[in-house]
Amino acid sequence: MRGFENILKIPELRKKIFYTFILLAVYRVGGHIPVPGIDGDALNQAFSQGGGLMGMYDLFVGGALRRASVFALGIMPYISASIIIQLLTSVFPYFERLKKEGEAGRQKMTEITRYATVVLAFIQGLGISQYLIGLNSQGVMIVPHPGIGFTVQTVVTMITGTIFVMWLGERITERGIGNGISLIIFAGIVGRLPGAIVSIYQDVFVLEQTGFITAIFLGVFMFAVVAFVVLMTEAQRRIPVTYAKQVRGRKVYGGQSTHIPLRLNTAGVIPVIFAQAFMMFPSSIAMFFPNSGVDVWVNAHLAPGSAVYIIIYTLLIILFAYVYTAITFNPQDLADNMKKYGGFIPGRKPGKSTAKYIEKVLVRVTLPGSIFLAAIAVMPMLMSRHANVNFMFGGTSLLIVVGVALETLRQIETHLLMRHYDGFLSKGKIRGRR
């Protein structure tokens, strides 16, 4: 409780947290405002029967698609645009130059990402409108009066909703606490928690479809998985670094030993989010062909839990873990900075040799980290497929929730320690020290 009291004692931190909660509340309220021209009861019944192609998409937008709300696209077009821009950075020299231009280049890349988000939102909004027109529940049409008017209205509304959600995420990042985009996804997933608890209660005590012992086992198992996720997320490979003594006038600098903490999971939950967004592309394409062979094939082969889906999803997580780590972590820059300040790794020459060594270690630790991410992401799918066991949340959701929560806690810790308060947690690796 002392940590919460310390948070309230810092006006700046208190304002940041309240500001973040207010914007997240706005996002949750907007997720319940439906697009006009849709039979809400029929749509909800259609999703209750399985959700079809868009069940996983609905999870990431906090059930907004199930309600056909103005935020039905959520933040996913922005994430998809970010993936494209990040990949182009490694391919085209223009984007690589922008990345190296500092704040001006970052602002230009953000502007390009916003334009790409609008284009993707238009495509996905058009696809969802056609998907809704072709969807029915027990013979009842989801859209009673389809036509060009409904399509234009839906596309414009969803593009506007996506732009507004993108704005909310950027405001949270700039003026709130934590990463705004990640927190919006976090809020959408956690917002489904009450409904999931009610569903489990009904399965165990009302419908008696799940035994009480099985429910207890699942609860203990999920707690153990969460603990393991936290452990692996905080795991580090420490590379020792020694700084040589430097005499400047009458003062002696350096002469101390420290380490470079290479996290086992340097990329965090980003590879999972990127891979999930990539796996939604086939569903987005299939929305343009409702009641045809395309959507049937996608549902049969690329639906979450299918063998093909699991294999591709696993490979994408591992691939994006390496790609994102390579984009965000530059061993050569780190080696140059160490050399500049007289630092060296024992047994390694400063400069190029040090950079190669750090890169070698980074590649080695990224492999088990990426495999861990993939294993947690697909584990619930495998258990549901072979053991007929359903979890409250899938592995993807669990990784996102835990990862975002830890990152937000770190930022709160930083604010507390900067003002000489005790850390938010009294124990653990992310506990602050004076």
Image (cartoon, rainbow, N blue to C red):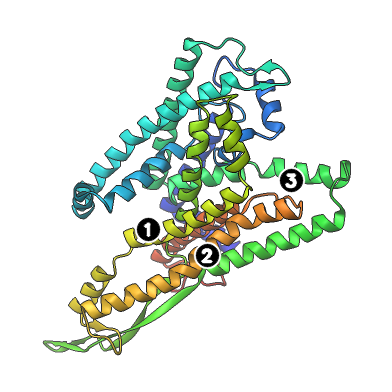
Q: Secondary structure at mark 3?
A: helix
Badge number at residue 323: 1
Q: Residue at image x 67%, y 31%? A: 47
Mark 1 and mark 2 in contact? Answer it, CB < 8 Å: no
Query: Residue at 33% across / 75% down in the picture?
Result: 358
Q: Position of residue 230 (x, y in %)?
A: 57, 65
Residue closer to the observer: 177 or 142:
142
- Callout 3 touching callout 2 (CB < 8 Å): no
Label 2 Cα crowd, 10 Å radius (few <14 / some 14-19 / many 20+)? some
Please tell me how crowded label 3 is: few (under 14), some (14-19), or many (20+) other residues with Cα within 10 Å.
Answer: few
Closer to the camera, 158 or 405?
158
Where is residue 394 drawn, in percent x and y?
63, 51
User: Which residue is under mark 3?
Assistant: 197
Q: Which of pointers 1 and 3 lies earlier in the amino acid sequence?
A: 3
Mark 1 secondary-structure assignment:
helix
Question: What label sits on residue 391 in the rendered view?
Answer: none
Image x and y of residue 292, in percent: 58, 25
Q: Is residue 235 left or right of residue 249?
A: right
* Quadrant for the C terminus in the image: bottom left
- Res. 371 mark: 2
Q: Residue at horizontal 58%, vertical 61%?
A: 375
Between disc 1 and disc 3, the foreground one is 1
Q: CA distance from mark 3 to mark 2?
A: 30 Å
**Which residue lies most toward the front here?**
293
Report, in whole angstroms, how far the alpha carbon at label 1 lies from the one at label 3.
Answer: 37 Å
Amino acid beneath label 2: Ile
How would you rate the neighbour count of disc 1 (Cα within 10 Å): few for under 14, some for 14-19, many for 20 or more?
some
Dots 1 and 3: beta carbons under 8 Å?
Answer: no
Distance between the Cα atoms at labels 1 and 2?
14 Å
**What amino acid is at disc 1?**
Val
Element type at marker 2? helix
